[in-house]
Every structure is written in structure tokens, then in C-alpha cells.
Amino acid sequence: MTGRPTLNQRRREATRLDIARTAAALFAERGVEETTAEEIALAAGISLRTFYRYFSVKEDAVAPLLAAGGQRWVDLLAESPADLPLREALERSAVASLTPADDAAVEAMHWTRSLLRDPRLDGTWQRVHAGSEERLRTVLAVRCPDGADPLEIRLAAAAATAAIRVALEQWAASDAPVTGPGSPQDLGGRCMRELTAGLRLTAGG
């Protein structure tokens, strides 16, 4: 067993992300309230029935797009060298995940800003971060030495996820650029440094 996704799973995830991009574009153009699930389905080239097989409400259609950055962060942290201090690994992986790699990533960041400014998506945003926290906790448990306090691991995962959420929300509420001063990676790095300095689990390095 390799744990690699099957072809059907990859296709399903690709469809979910395509719907998410379509929904994000419509939400950014018209607003969440003025956009219907029918319009998202039509623009995505799927039936309404298919749309509801993937998402129970229209607001959750953008969840895969919002979750992509958090998944990248967790993946980068999991791939960090085992001998890299946890504090440094958290900051490096967070900053890297918040740095757009190409034009598509830049566009996704602009969509993210628009989405985070709409209060109707607050519930979706909170659920996305709850999922990120659980995935991060699993990775931290693997990286931490045997005997590490599960409570401290859980606290570190919750606090680190909150730090990234705050950084993104602060950026989204401003007119700061996608890169450079005031950008997500700038604020994310700052939040992560402030946070990890106060956690016993990461204070040692």
C-alpha cells in the first residue's frame, strides 16, 4: 500500500478544485449572496445534481481553494528535514506556503482576499482552518520526540493555525500587495515568530 490517490480520487479532487475556482470567480464578481448554486454549476459545466454531490451549500464550494494553502503548508512541514528545529520548520514552511509560485497562485491570492472580505463565508473559512489544524497536529506529533505532551502538540497546532489565519485576515482587510511588505508571507512569518517564541514545544529551537 503506497497511500497514493487512485485515478478516480484525483479526478474527483480536480473537479472539486475546478468548481471552487469557478465559484470564487463568480463570488468575486457578483458577491456570495447574488450568486446561486445553479449559476456556479452552469459556469463549471456540470449539472446542479453533480454540484450538490460535491458541496451541500454554495458557500462551501470555495473551501477547496481556501484549503489549498493550508494543505501546502502541512505538506511542506512534513517534508522539512528532521533535524531542522521545529520553530524554524514551522516558520519556513508557513512562509513558503504563503508565497505565490506562479501567476495562477497570484490570482488565487486575489480571490482569497475577496472571499475573506465577505462575512457570508466566515463559516466556511472557520471549517477550513479546523481541518488544517487537525492535519497540522498529525504532522507535529510525528516530528516531536517520543513522550511529547499531547496537550502541547494540540496547543501548538491550534495556535500555529490561528497565526496563519490572523495573517491572512489582516492582509485581506488591507490593500497590501501579494508579495513584499504587508503581504501574506510577510505577516505570516511575523505571526509565526511571535507565536513560536511563546510556546514551550518550540521555544527550544
Image: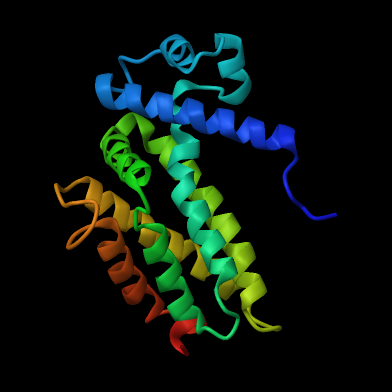
- Tell me if 191 is positioned left or right of 93 in this view: left
Q: How is the image coloured?
A: rainbow
Residue at the extreme right of the image, as rendered: 1
Residue at left 64%, top 71%? 141
Place of residue 57 in the rendered image (x, y in percent of width and height, measured from the top left): 50, 22
Q: Which one is nearer the viewer's eye here, 150 or 44?
A: 44
- Rendering quarter of residue 196: bottom left
Q: Which one is nearer the viewer's eye here, 155 or 42?
A: 42
On-image quarter of the N terminus: bottom right
Residue at left 20%, top 46%? 173
Q: In this orientation, does residue 150 appear? A: no
Residue at the extreme front of the image, as rendered: 102
Q: In this orientation, does residue 105 appear? A: yes
Where is 10 relative to 91, above or below? above
- Tell me if 182 is positioned left or right of 59 in this view: left
Where is 139 relative to 29, above or below? below
- Tell me if 4 is positioned left or right of 20 in this view: right
Q: Which one is nearer the viewer's eye here, 114 or 130?
A: 114
Residue at the extreme bottom of the image, as rendered: 204
- Rendering quarter of residue 123: top left
Place of residue 153 in the rendered image (x, y in percent of width and height, measured from the top left): 58, 72
Place of residue 50 in the rendered image (x, y in percent of width and height, measured from the top left): 61, 15
Residue at left 19%, top 60%? 182
- Tell me if 188 is positioned left or right of 156 in this view: left
Residue at left 51%, top 13%? 45
Q: How many marks?
A: 0
